[in-house]
Image (tube, rainbow, N blue to C red):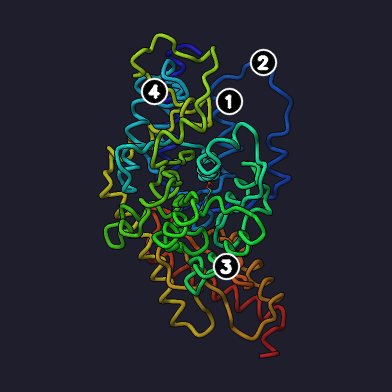
Amino acid sequence: MNPGEFREMGHQVVNLLAEYLDHIEEKRVFPDVEPRTVNALFAEALPQEPSPSERVLGELESKLLPYCTNVGHPGYMGLITPSPNPVGIIADFICSALNQNVGAYSIGPSAVAMERRVVRWLTDLCGYGAKAGGNLTSGGMMANFIGLKVGRDAVTRDIAQHDGINQRWAVYASEERHVSVDKAVDCVGLGRNALRALPTDAKFQVRIDALEEAIARDKKEGIRPMCIVGMFGTTNTGAVDDIRELRRIADREGMWLHADAAYGGGMLISHEWPMRDRGLELADSITIDPHKWFYAPLDAGAVLVKDHDRLTASFGMKPSYLTDELDHSNERYQYYVHGFEQSRRFRSLKVWMSFKRYGARQIGEWIDNNVRQAKHLYSLTENNAEFEPATEPPMSAICIRFKGPKLSEAESKELHAEVAQRVEQSGRFWMSTTDLKGKTWFRINPVNFRTREEHMEQLFALLQQECHEFVSEKGVASRR
Ligand SMILES: Cc1ncc(COP(=O)(O)O)c(C=O)c1O
């Protein structure tokens, strides 16, 4: 590809994407296509011969774009994937062009400096002090894993990372934790059965009495408490655990406290409901994902550690092919020595550019709008005899359920799954379903700067219509 063609293709792509974004609201949220049809579109052998750029772009226009889930559409209120902010989109383009590898200083001095600054912004937002550090990660899953690994090493005084686990340990988290916590407990060598899933109260916050009981029970059996994972914004309802109480218990038991603010971290820059007084800074490590509620395009998660030295203790291996022998003053920051991932994309660029272009003030306003939208749906639901909300949403994730005529739990499950599918088929909205305390719910979660209050009203009207249709089709109404 010569420079002229690069320019030409680049302009075409920018035009294509600008057009896509200009008209995103007119598109279906989810494509009307069967999986086998999309698979067939890409079923071809490895191309041996080149194709002109126009043909490659043409294929994208016909095969890729029409069958995307348009997460930037205001009706996308599903799994936590934001409408990517346009500056972030441009940043990712630049990022690939420069291909800085922030794993090592020698492959990107300014990119390393930028990531360190972004990490500093995030640690400041969380209320950490100057000793804190962290890494941008592929997402919350990786950040929770790193948090648990650093916690395991700190609590076992680095023995586990050399000799493995030779005792029985337990990790404690709410039943509302994200599944990444279970995977992390497994991956740090404790085994998933070492995770104690604790019941929550009516607001879906972990019950402290249940935590105390679980710890006492484990200690009686010779199992040592290792870590508490506190939720700072659960996936289902945005619940925030009592981090201060968790800290008190963790200190008493010599445990690590990791806080999962992958989603809820956005509330730190909310203007109307700022959650800067919830004790997040008391956690030893924190997961916070710019690719969730700072509206950065995927991927950009982050793990923050209150004491940067713990990162180095957990990951500070220096293979000879990477070591910077001549850096006597230790000024060349090597992420590979202070983190798990080696080759790493220059993720901080989109976060840095987004904060520079919009400022935390504008991003905080988007967050407030999303919270307001969830609260609006809550009040619509509260005032409707056929629906119930799980709880008032503290963030933008809200769970509601249809309780219309008396349905068995199996029927209710079927109704919610079927209606969610019909909503998907409508092409107007996308939301998921979930289970909370043994019941099935619609889970609706705007993390989207294009969503407006009217969309919540339209979605609620559609839900009512589809629930009624389901009930009459299935003849459930006759048993009313
Ligand atoms: C509370 C919470 N933690 C962790 C994760 C995992 O994050 P990721 O999907 O970025 O790996 C999620 C994802 O939604 C989440 O909601």
Query: Can you tell me whether the CB of the residue at mark 4 lies under 8 Å from the nearest atom of ligand 1?
Result: no
Disc 4 target residue: 333
Give me the residue at 34% from left, 29% from top.
114
Q: Position of residue 405 (x, y in %)?
A: 62, 85
Left/right placement of residue 357 relative to residue 44 reads left
Disc 3 target residue: 213
Of 478 and 102, nearer the camera is: 102
Q: How far is the residue under mark 2 from the one under mark 4?
A: 43 Å
The quadrant of the rendering that contains the C terminus is bottom right
Left/right placement of residue 53 relative to residue 474 reads left
Disc 2 target residue: 49
Left/right placement of residue 224 relative to residue 136 reads right
- Looking at the rendered image, the disc whose residue lies closer to the viewer, 2 or 3, is 3
Q: Position of residue 364 (x, y in %)?
A: 30, 53
Q: Amino acid at mark 1?
A: Arg
The numbered mark at residue 55 is 1
Of 114 and 327, nearer the camera is: 327
Q: How far is the residue under mark 4 from the one under mark 1?
A: 43 Å
- Looking at the rendered image, the disc whose residue lies closer to the viewer, 2 or 1, is 2
Q: Amino acid at mark 3?
A: Glu
In this rendering, does residue 240 appear at all?
no
Q: Earlier in the sequence, mark 3 or mark 4?
A: 3
Q: Earlier in the sequence, mark 2 or mark 4?
A: 2
Q: How far is the residue under mark 3 from the one under mark 1?
A: 64 Å
